[in-house]
Image (tube, rainbow, N blue to C red):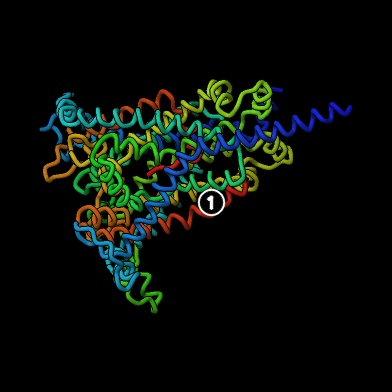
Amino acid sequence: MAELDAASDGRRHRPITNAIIIAILTVAVIFYLMPVYVMVITGFKAAADVSLANMWEVPATFTVDGYRSAWDKLSPNLATSFQLAIPATILSGLIGAVNGYLFSKWKFRGSDVLFTLLLFGMFIPYQSILIPLIRFLDYINLYGTLPGLIIVHVVYGLPITTLIFRNYFTNIPGEIIEAARVDGDGVIGIFFRIMLPLSLPAFVVVGIFQFTNIWNDFLFGLTIITNPREQPITVALNNLSGGFAVEWNVLMAGAVIAALPTAILYILLGRFFVRGMLAGSMKG
Amino acid sequence: MATAEHDETKYGEVTRKRAFVETGVAKLLLSPSLIAILVFVYGFIGATLYVSISNWRSSTIDLSPSDPILGIYDRLFHMTRFQIDLRNTFVFTILFLLFAVVVGLVLALLLDQRIFGRSLFRNIFLFPYALSFIVTGVSWRWIFSPQTGINLLVENLGINAALDAIGLPAFSPAWLTTPEVVGDLASWIPFLDGINAQLGLPLAMIPVVIAATWQLSGFAMAMYLAGLGTISHDIREAAQLDGASSWRIYRDIIIPLLRPITISILIILGHVSLKIFDLIFAMSGSGPGFATDVPGIFVYEQTFRATRYNLGAAASIVMLLLVSIVIVPYLARTLKEL
């Protein structure tokens, strides 16, 4: 039996085949970790130690000077990114939950068309709405402000959050809804009494995925916030890399700092991230 | 009996009334989001379209219509830089999609085997997807600078010495710093008039393709792994019992079954690559001789640096149209399946 099982669908191999597969995968791992390796070791080098010749070598002496210097320059922007990503994620998640619930369980004539028109919003290149967007934010006195940027991320986050919640709620059987209706619950009652308690996993997926998207945004932060001290970390990091004399150890330490929050989320809760990604995930 | 029937009608009426009210509540609750999307997506696209046919080309707003009405588009398509941008976008999209799909598929097929450390490998390959393009662009920029990075690694590994020993030139490409464009399609198609850009392969685009593949091939891998997970054990087993080798099972059964997944990957990554901006902005900017310039950078510079709003708007509408060609059929198909 065991022998039959082992050979059952052609996915068990002789040790030699296994070794070849693992060897190929290990080469791939080296490629995938190479930029991360460069960032981390360079960040720990002393300024004098960052010469071109020993780029690939581990630091002669480990120092946190690069990190300290990057921290001094980037910590206000790091704070901005948190102040931006957390409220924008929560708001777009909550609104997306309501929308997803309504689009999946309270369909009306034309609701699928409206849902599709909403989805289009997550594929557009944001360059094509920037000019009127900035005029609009200026008109309501929010251009250049963090609340303005939060609103932008909430609105353009609605398609993906609605999509993830809609897909999640679609799988909840209609009988539960019917039973609650017989008990006298309406649209809003069913949402709070039935759907919301069931939707924690969807909130985790949306939360992680949206936090990552908003944290990693560059274009909106670059064009909507004008004061360099108040720009999100991705924009500040890019500013750090401009100029003629780039301090590579500081820049790489800054890159590590900018990457850490989403990297930690990914390492701890990666499987939820993958679910968000596969739900129709976009980047860029 | 009569009462029961009466009750039923009454109940039906109440249900209908209630359904009417409930649908009304649903529409009411959806309306803020729908209005926001109507304004922020469709309204703003309309406004950008309007700017693109206006005379607004300085910091002072001038929304008078340009003459001729599509004059800006005419100018845009005659600009050598924008022609280069379109060429770069096509070159980048084709190479990147090819690499991402092949790498993603190979990794997924390898991880589909029962090997040790499967989930660790998978998590590492997907990790770059969670990072910002700016972060990774900074790192790749250094890896591909010609005096250090890859070239230095090759030198240190003694590969250049070996090449020299057998009489071959040393491996030291200029990577991001070369303005060289290889080949020219125009020499094959003689009737292409008004094209000033060399329709070839800009070599500086290759490092960008590598970086983008590194960052996004994990997405293709995850999509394929999800697809492989749905291919039933029974199919594999049946083929196995018919005496098919595992190579043939993959070639004749599993890979053909993955076709719809490949199409989804091409659409999703294709639209990402058509609007690529952050990665190139951080890695190389416009590059030497605009060798890595793309419409996303063009729009940003024309709009925010040069304040030529109409020109920037027109280029962004071209970007939107390119993305729409890929996305609209995809959304139409999704709608049919809803």
Residue for point 39% across, 46% down: B40
Residue occupying image coordinates x 17% and y 35%: A229
- Left or right of residue A78: residue B119: right
The residue nearer to you, when weighing A70 against A125, is: A125
Q: Nearer the viewer, residue B165 or A54?
A: A54
Secondary structure, mark 1, is: helix
Write the residue at 26% across / 39% down. A142
The quadrant of the rendering that contains the C terminus of chain A is: top left
The x, y position of residue A262, in whole percent, is 35, 30
Q: Position of residue B282 (x, y in %)?
A: 26, 45
Q: Position of residue B295 (x, y in %)?
A: 32, 57
Is A87 situated above or below A137? above
| Label 1 environment density (alpha carbons within 10 Å; few <14, some 14–19, many ≥20) | some
Kind of residue sitting beneath label 1: Tyr
User: With respect to residue B283, does B324 lie above or below?
Assistant: below
Question: Residue at 17% across / 44% down in the picture?
Answer: A242
**Which residue corresponds to mark 1?**
B330
Q: Nearer the viewer, residue A39 or B310?
A: B310
Spot occupied by residue A38 in the image (x, y as percentages of width and height): 26, 35
Please report, as a chain letter, where disc 1 is located: B
Residue A29 picture quarter: top left
